[in-house]
Amino acid sequence: MKEYHQYPMWDASLSLEERLDDLIARLTTEEKIRLIPTREAAVPRLGIPAYNVGGEAAHGVAWKGEATVFPQPLGLSSTWNTRIMREIGSVIGDEARAYHHRDPEVHGLTLWAPTVDLERDPRWGRTEEGYGEDPVLTGEMSAALVKGMQGSDPFYLKMVATLKHFFANNNEKDRLNCSSSIDPRNLREYYLKAFETPFVEGGALSMMTAYNSINGTPAIESPYVNDVVKGEWGMPGFIVCDGGDLSQTVNYHGYHTSHAESAAGALKAGVDCLTDEVDLVVSALEEALDRNLLEIADLDRAIRNIFGVRMRLGQLDQSGQNPYASIPESVLCAPEHAKLSYRAAAESIVLLQNDGLLPLQPEALQKISVIGPLADVVYTDWYSGTLPYRVSVLDGLRNRLPETDVIYVDGNDRIQLKTTDGQVITLGAEGTLVAVPEANAPTAAEFVHQDWGWGSHTLRSVKNNRYVSLTEQGIYQANAPQIGGWFVKEVVRIDPLTDGSNTLRTWNGIPVGLSEYQGQSAVSPPRPQGEQTTGTSTTQDNVSASGHASQSPGNTQIPSAFNIDIVTSGIQQAVEAARSSQASVVVVGNSPYINGKEEIDRPSLLLPPSQVELVKAVCEANPNTVVVIMGSYPFALQELKGIARAIVYMTHAGQELGNALADVLLGYYAPAGRLNMTWYEDESQLPDIMDYDIIQNGMTYMYHEGPVQYAFGHGLTYSEFEYEAIRVSRSAPSESTTTDQLKIEVEVHNTGERDSDEVVQIYGSSYTSRVKRAQKQLLAFRRIHVKAGTRVTIGFEVPVQNLALWDVTRDRYCLETATWAILAGRSSADIRQSADIEIEGETIPDRPLHLLTFAENYDACAGVLLDECLEGRSAVRAITREEPLYREEQLSWIAFNHNAVQEVQGFEARVAAFGEEGRLEIRSGGLEGELLGVCEVSGPGGSVNGKDIKWTTVQCSLEAPHQVNELYIIFKGGAALRHFRLL
């Protein structure tokens, strides 16, 4: 026995706190510092092994080798099935354990999933990673996954789930330095709600902070980590920052001037583990201690949180009691895991519309055409695991239709490239694209040309079936087996010129020409003067995946113009195939690496125009055409309105994609997936992507008042369902509940001829409220299986407190006295039963504006942002001209309604000048209402992040002889307001 095995920290019979106390007492300061980076150092003298915090598990264990791959998280959420989510989580935990057994110091058990942050805007480039736009659905589904991942043992953990990204991280543009402005109602009723459930009910023991700031404070230092996550919710695990965010707080946010300040700020704000270069973290912490920015107690608190989790994972433990230590490596890609992947894919499929075409009749199909650029691929994304095998749509239909003639056309043109000066592009050694005079060319290379829209294209060699990609040597070769990577170098940008020729550009926008490579004229971006194309310096220096780059001053190469000759028309082939078939299936959608991914928001909600053209042509050629949308996010499909008889949606669904879809199309499985996001008609229905106020902007199904293409919760099946006899009552707390419950029952009758799943959705809507409330809000849901011709009674219990709103007048949740409609239906727009119930709560009193009132607690606003105030809470200020939400001629104001104060004589406020001097106009009744007074805000102004702003208290007199029921404060110049009161 090693000497350290006798230490209390190794004694699993002691309490966790006793063991942690002993561990912390034995560690030196240097050892403590080296346990804070995500690559945690070994402490051999205490038997502590090195440990790697992190790794990905969004829809299966990723980046380690072959593992079971499930549908993208947006697809998992489309199942609306918490039971299958828990099963999937358990498989992820099993396979994470298998890799951990293989190499414990490399493959950690604290993996980064699920993504819980809400998706209020479908233009977000990472929409595939989340669970949709609703906090109840997201919270319940992610909590179920967490429970499966972490296991059911009361002490030991199978693995640890890390919720991300906390929070309001729903844009990629400027994500490293932007700030999301979130007022208290949006914060408490929406953004935080999604995280509360997987922590409080799911028991998640880790969380990752986001890159962005919230109200001017970088998320890595957000007060909500300590105040809410660790305080109100009592999360006992550890918090990690996103990759590189320690340094980015200095380099991008400009929030600190040194990494020591950044490290100290993060640890004091509740972040325990820093994801950055080890040497950077260590030196920053050493400096922070030397400068008294941190105390040893701050390190101790972080280590207590980290090792509280590591010990529950079974580390520093010789008891043999850990039930997960014996999970064998043979669980990796086990057959039962593949079956679960199939079930998840099948349950995720959403039937958007169907006029009776589906299901297809297998016995009557003699010939079917499978068409489209996504018909014979199974795409993975950046956070996917390595597929053990793949079944495409084409494979799946051929598997299920062995006696049917299944023909395939991808719908893409076959093209050849020629320069305008008479050279043709051929394929040289190693697939190099080489320009040869046409008279000397043996054969021009032929490429499969796929137009992804918005200037993004890919070329795949017909000869070797490899994608054309920009190599590290700075030349183009047809050598990539698939599209992918952080920098997606398979993307070629094609810009048409007025003479009919085209300019080609690299993935990041650099014009392409010809340069010498191994004695040949190779297709490549420009090289610095005098340099041949042999080095590795062309593609990544000082650029991001968003594609901003410029040509070096020394470049002498002139970009070439290229003619694109169509050898074979993809649409013509598709039309011929469709006409010759009894039915067609056309599969379109996106690549997870193009026009929407990490660092890149979507350019549009539309399908690529070339795909729309293909769908229209195939549907015209064969009316019996099923359109399959395979994508990472919602689409605007107005262009297909009236074109397609049946439309099916699914995400990139993993290894069993093709088998699952084939079974749905052929009627072997009745689809019952539901949309977890609103599918808008077009992006004009959305505000600026940086505007996070869903209430005032009318975003998501809860607040959007206009028409939509497909509603939240929508999804059809092959049977018919009727809802009957809804009953709603309120019950007092019982042994299993601590609060009053709404008891809801509804009968669901399968009136059709097929057994089918059904997703029963319960919504609530308040008839009256002091404030603008959601038109509907999801209260509960359940996926059930109902046999044809039978009926079942489904019961729900919903805490009455879930009907509460955040009362900005008193800084707390409030259950208002009101009549509520409790609604049961098949989607948010398809309500089948409703019942009213009187909710006895309280009436929000009129505002006592003679008391200190925080500016952030307004009732309405326009043209303002919430920003940081180091005195606590958030300040309100006008949007400046340089910021994305600025609009010419827009007034900046906040309003406070239902006020009780009378005989107002003065105004006292805590103010500062942000950038420049300003003033506050105080008005009654509206923006053009009576001017009561003006409060001047003098400089000096400071930086907008609030770090060196000087706050001061000012007063001004008001002329208001009568009651001010609606108080408006209008911001001019750089005036910022923390709080005020009327005198």
Image (spheres, rainbow, N blue to C red):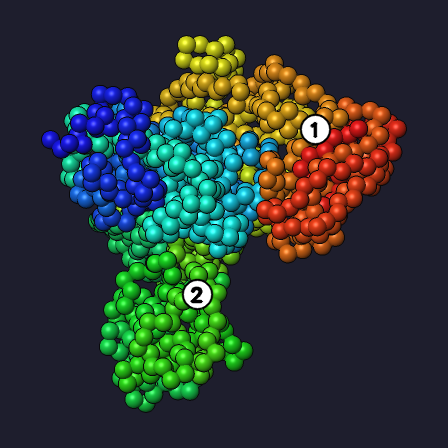
Q: Residues within 10 Å of mark 2 (few under 14, many from 20)?
A: few
Task: Please state if 981 lies on the left or on the right of 455 as rendered.
Answer: right
User: What residue does disc 2 label?
Assistant: 542
The 10 Å Cα crowd at callout 1, few under 14, some 14 to 19, many 20 or more, is some
Q: Where's residue 29, x and y in %?
A: 33, 40
Q: Residue furthest left?
A: 1
Q: Where is the N terminus found, in terms of image quarters?
A: top left
Amino acid residing under circle 2: Asn
Name which residue lies at 53% across and 18% down: 800
632, above or below 92, in the image: below
* Residue 588 in view in this figure: no
Q: Is residue 626 left or right of residue 429?
A: right
Residue at image position (39%, 87%) is 422
Residue 436 on image: x %, y %: 32, 85
Residue identifier under label 1: 852
Of marks 1 and 2, the one in the foreground: 1
Q: Is residue 876 left or right of residue 259?
A: right
- Return the x and y of residue 734 as percentages of the image width and height: 44, 9
- On screen, residue 290 versus residue 636, left or right, reads left
Of the pair 99 and 699, the residue shown nearer to us: 99
**Quadrant in the picture for the C terminus:** top right
Looking at numbered disc 1 in the image, what kind of residue is underneath it?
A: Leu
Q: Position of residue 478 (x, y in %)?
A: 29, 70
**Rendered view: 564 above or below 488:** below
- Report the front residue among 777 and 238: 238
As drawn, 658 above or below 90: below
In this orientation, does residue 33 appear? yes
